[in-house]
Amino acid sequence: MKTTQKVTAISSLKEALQHAFDDEVKAYETYSAVIEKFGAVFPFMNIIQAEQTHQDALVAVATAHEIILVRTVPEHISIPKTLRECCELGVAAEIQNIQCYDELLLHVKDYAEVQDLFYRLQAASFNNHLPAFRNAVISYASPKNTAEANPMAALEGMMGQWGEFSQMAQKIAKGEINQEEITKLLSSNFSFVAGALLGVVGAGVLGGMVQPEENKDEHEEA
């Protein structure tokens, strides 16, 4: 997550550990805020548990070096309006976290156990958190989830396409629709409406278009 001080300004083990701890705390608090707003949603519920584990690991290694880490909660955390945007925020945050550890590792070369911990925390972000958020962005961007997350937006979109559907329905009724237009209709974001139009108005027309191909195949087989 975005931190309040520059990594390049770090000059001691304590500052490196505190910087890493601040980053993990902000991640935890941000993902907690998402859960508070949207409920127990994936992948935040899984990742927030890992963020707590990361904090505990940093505290443990700091304690071993007689260093006390201060837990500072960000004063204001801005949460996007949709889950997709929250997951996009997660992607950006994990990329930044990976880059953060790249720089922090330069300051702990003399402390093998700290270096090992930083590598493991970085690997968790790269191998687990980042892919989870990327997959979630794709999932929440699907038409099904878009409609569920924002039904009014889906309705507005459907009404905006209704004129096109009406024209298609008239073509179906007159037998003037071609295969390309049927494919376009069924591949639209509102394919359930398109399917209804074809089912009610165009079953006979569609059947008439397909039947010649079937007869052709039977003739060739014979």
Image: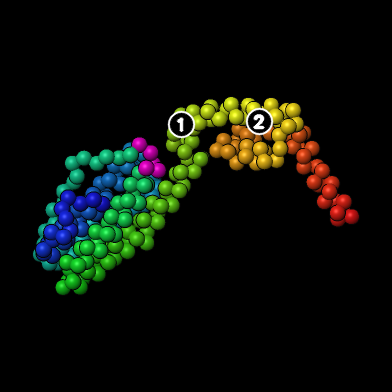
Label at residue 168: 2
Residue 154 visible in this rendered orientation of the protein: yes
**Which residue corresponds to mark 1?**
153
Q: Would you say 157 lies left or right of 116 here?
A: right
Label at residue 220: none
**Which quadrant of the structure image shows residue 80?**
top left
Rendered-image quadrant of the C terminus: bottom right
Q: Confirm or deny contact between disc 2 and disc 1 (CB under 8 A).
A: no
Given residues 129 and 8, the one toward you in this image is 8
Main secondary structure type of the part rendered in magenta: helix
Residue 61: percent from left, percent from top = 18, 65
What kind of residue is marked 1?
Ala
Residue 210: percent from left, percent from top = 77, 42
Given residues 196 and 41, the one toward you in this image is 196
Residue shown at the point (58%, 38%) measured from the top left: 188
Residue shown at the point (43%, 52%) measured from the top left: 135
Tag 1: Cα neighbours inside 10 Å, few (<14), some, or many (≥20)? few
Residue shown at the point (15%, 57%) measured from the top left: 18
What kind of residue is marked 2?
Met
Residue 186 visible in this rendered orientation of the protein: no
Q: Would you say 191 lies left or right of 112 here?
A: right
Rendered image coloring scheme? rainbow
SS assignment at label 1? helix
Given residues 201 and 38, the one toward you in this image is 201
Q: How much space separates mark 2 and mark 1, taking CA atoms?
A: 23 Å
Vertical placement of residue 88 versus 66, above or below: above
Is residue 84 located in the magenta-colored stretch of the structure?
A: yes
SS assignment at label 2? helix
* Numbered range of the magenta stretch: 81-85
Task: Residue at the far right: name it.
Answer: 222
Residue 105: percent from left, percent from top = 21, 66
Residue 194: percent from left, percent from top = 63, 34
